[in-house]
Amino acid sequence: VKHREIAKAKAVAAGVNSERLWRSLEDLGSVGATEAGGVCRLAYSPAYRQGRDLFVSWCRDAGLSVSTDGIGNIFARRQGRNPQAPSIMLGSHLDSQPSGGRYDGAYGVLAGLEVARRLNDLGMDTEFPIEIVSWANEEGARFDRPLLGSSVFCGRTPLSSALALKAIGGESIEQELNDDLVWRAMPRRQESLPHAYLELHIEQGPVLEAAAVPIGIVTGTLAVRWYDVIVAGEEAHAGPTPMLARRDAMMGAAELILEARDAANRFAPHGRATVGQCMLSPGSRNVVPGEVRLSLDLRHEDEAHLDAIEESVREAGRLMNRRGLHVQISEAWRMDACKFDSALRGHLITATSQNGLAFVELPSGAGHDAVSLSTIVPTAMIFVPCLGGISHNPAESITQQQAETGADILFRTVVELAT
Amino acid sequence: VKHREIAKAKAVAAGVNSERLWRSLEDLGSVGATEAGGVCRLAYSPAYRQGRDLFVSWCRDAGLSVSTDGIGNIFARRQGRNPQAPSIMLGSHLDSQPSGGRYDGAYGVLAGLEVARRLNDLGMDTEFPIEIVSWANEEGARFDRPLLGSSVFCGRTPLSSALALKAIGGESIEQELNDDLVWRAMPRRQESLPHAYLELHIEQGPVLEAAAVPIGIVTGTLAVRWYDVIVAGEEAHAGPTPMLARRDAMMGAAELILEARDAANRFAPHGRATVGQCMLSPGSRNVVPGEVRLSLDLRHEDEAHLDAIEESVREAGRLMNRRGLHVQISEAWRMDACKFDSALRGHLITATSQNGLAFVELPSGAGHDAVSLSTIVPTAMIFVPCLGGISHNPAESITQQQAETGADILFRTVVELAT
């Protein structure tokens, strides 16, 4: 025991191999590279498979045993002293948006690999197995169901319905996998629940950069509600119709949009209101719109506050009804808020403090595979800042130092949990 | 002279033949009739030619001499005692919007014909010739240049460029006219300026109906300015980006839209602001729009007031620039305000009063062929109410009584001017 404690202390002090991690990110970033400097590795595509194959070859070189499952998630296991013990699972995803960046997902997967490689360097064994995971189709860009691989793994989406999903081009995931000889040849993962799941990811937002801290400890994810809003007024000619005689759907929509913004601002900093789509009918320059359809995306980490934001918008709609505009607000989709495991978050905070680093606790505004995992095992996430908060964009960028800092926290926490 | 005075008094007292006018409107309304109850007589189309041919046959039956010109305007002349005298010109147009109504344009042409028929009934001659005109391509629906025939007539558009205009399908007006054997066989109008131009039209707006008056005396037309507005912000993810970190182009656009409305309202009742088009980029439900492009249509009868409305919008845009949104407002098109002839308007007011009718004076918010004519000869317009102010729509509707009342004013005024 004494011997292990010394090894552990040495390992933790050493941290990860920053050069190796960065080189792996560079090498993987060249697979599916776009002219704009980003990557296009759409789920199940040839570029995606090529990236996966590179990752698998690195895993095998590191002595990890690679397996897969029915939806194409990839697991790379570093055995523990107790082979029956549940694994400490680390990972993210290797697929990208069509015009994606080099770090979204890839960073979490390769940092997991670096943790295993570093344990190898140090000749260090762990009590619990370590399992690096690359989740299939996290982005939902080609097959329109984000977090798909992790949802299937966690029993939230039936495998059969996931396999039946079709891309725009028409192929189903099942067809793609049937054509994937590498996947077909892989052994299937033995079904077992991991002990815990940790995901390291770029923030994809501006908070850490603005706060000038290198680490974010993610408290959970914001609740999301999507609405389809229809503002119906009366089509009229722009010229002959005096302002007071109009029932102008666009003016009503503009008021509603600003009310949503103001309501989200009243519940700062975690309230969000976004109108990303707005369609005017008939859409003619000199015709007062008779109807406006818009999308509304409201978010907050606290469901009660989100209720209040929603109610503000609905009340504004009701007031417009009295003014001759008919406003219809229908919920199109919702995702409940998710709270990450407080004990695991405590481990991350301890590791960050032990490394002498500043951090902030913040909710994630975007969904991650960790949300799926949190429904079945203790889960937590670490964020590192990315340049300008820009993501899903070829301009997505982090520094080698930022990549190393996040991986160091992951490494220290895994050593703490697994040994 | 005494004899003529008596005949004139009798004629004026008799008014038009309401049944005949209404039957003509019904008959013409069956040409190009749509299932929805409106008409589709796109300029130069087979349905349009059929309607024109019907009108021409009625003119010939009424003893009028029909001529045309290079762009296909149709003139039907009732000779005066003084054949050298310039004509009193009355008219409007027979083309329609694709989903147009039965009265827009047709009413003014057939009321002109009814004036001539009524003079025939009464065996009444006039000093000045009376000329009924049907202007070509007023709507600009198939060939995208409204008021085309009257613009060519008034020398505001060169004939050659008008003939070269192409429809969506690809045919030019020149090709359409070359295929039009009826038009080719018609004599060309002798070039001469009319003495005055009068146009009777449905209001296409709600003012007369709301004021419950049967007649509107049109003061002129509103100045119109069209702008292309671009609000540029920064694309960002709806989830991870706190409200304060956003440069949300849609929120800026919504503020600008409401500022335009408020500015138009400050110059009521003749200020107008309309946003008929609004396009968000990238147009995704969970992405904060990085750019919004919108159309802005501002109108006022007073150019100085319109300047002030425009300046309010520009100032709002400049304030947004300081908040990180870049607003660009470019003028896309403008039409100056037009003032109709005050002496002619006086004649219309006198005729209305002599018929014991209430009226309001109001500007026209829409363009009419009278705007073209006002640039070369004294011009005025009469409006009658239409149901709900609805036009450019199959539901466009007026009553026989309303049609008769307007035609009576036209008739009385023509008798006054021409005899």
Image (cartoon, coloured by chain):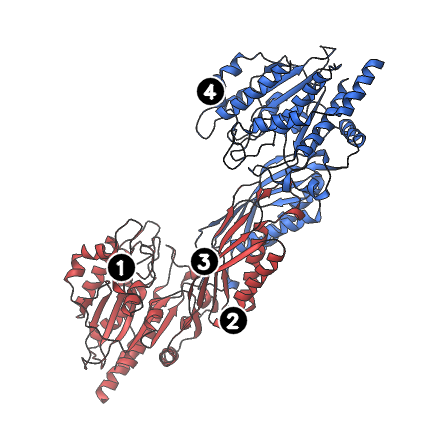
Chain colours: A red, B blue
> Which residue carries the number 3 mark?
B236
Q: Earlier in the sequence, mark 1 or mark 2?
A: 1
Q: Position of residue A346 (x, y in %)?
A: 38, 80
Nearer to us: label 1 or label 4:
4
The residue singled out by tag 1 in the image is A28
The answer to whether residue A18 shows anywhere in this view is no
Amino acid bearing label 4: Gln
Measured in 3D between alpha carbons, the distance from the residue under mark 4 to the one under mark 3, in whole angstroms, is: 51 Å
Local crowd size for mark 2, using a 10 Å CA cut-off: few (<14), some (14–19), many (≥20): some
Three-letter code, disc 2: His
The answer to whether residue A29 is visible is yes
Mark 1 and mark 3: Cα distance apart in space: 25 Å
Chain for disc number 4: B
Instruction: Say which quadrant the C terminus of chain B sits in.
Output: top right
Q: Residue furthest bottom?
A: A2
Q: What element does badge 3 sit on?
A: strand
From the image, state whether disc 1 or disc 3 is nearer to you: 3
Look at discs 4 and 3 and give the one toward the viewer: 4
